[in-house]
Amino acid sequence: MKIDFIADTNFLIYLHEGNRIVEPFLEYNFGISFISEVELLGFHGISKSDETKLKLLLNDCFQLDWNLKIKDQTILLKRKHAIKLPDAIIAATSMVYDIPLVTADKGFSKIKNLDLVLIEI
């Protein structure tokens, strides 16, 4: 399966909440970094209902797992940019697989070699 873009965690939150801002992207195939699953399901205070719905959503996504290339790229990004570790992992995943990242987080725009699609909320 061809992956058209990597969905950032905030994209998945908007999708889960039914926010129409992500609708134009739903006709495409998208993948996620494993870290998005950790961020979503590891949310403190998540309800059992939300956990169940998020697991169903995540099961429909193609998950890109941690590997040596992503680790090395994450280290480079952390050294060069002041970004949080989860964001560095997601950006590194996008860069390693040469797949655009779709996000509403403007903080990613400081990474010059990242193929970025910013959603305006």
Image: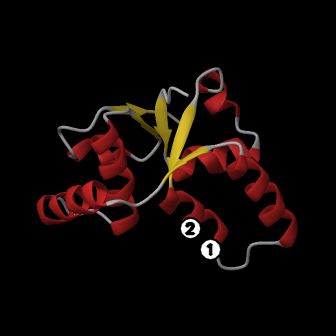
Q: Residues within 10 Å of mark 2 (few under 14, many from 20)?
A: few
Q: Position of residue 102 (x, y in %)?
A: 46, 36
Q: Position of residue 107 (x, y in %)?
A: 32, 50
The kind of residue tagged 2 is Val
The one nearer the camera, 107 or 115, is 115
**Tag 1 secondary structure:** loop
The kind of residue tagged 1 is Gly
Identify the residue under disc 2. Answer: 38
**Is 110 placed above or below 65 here?**
above
**Is 25 placed above or below 48 here?**
above
Identify the residue under disc 1. Answer: 42
Q: Position of residue 1 (x, y in %)?
A: 55, 28
Tell me if residue 107 can be seen: no
The one nearer the camera, 29 or 87, is 29
Quadrant housing residue 106: top left
* Residue drawn at the location 72% of the way across and 79% of the way down: 45
Outermost residue, left direction? Answer: 80
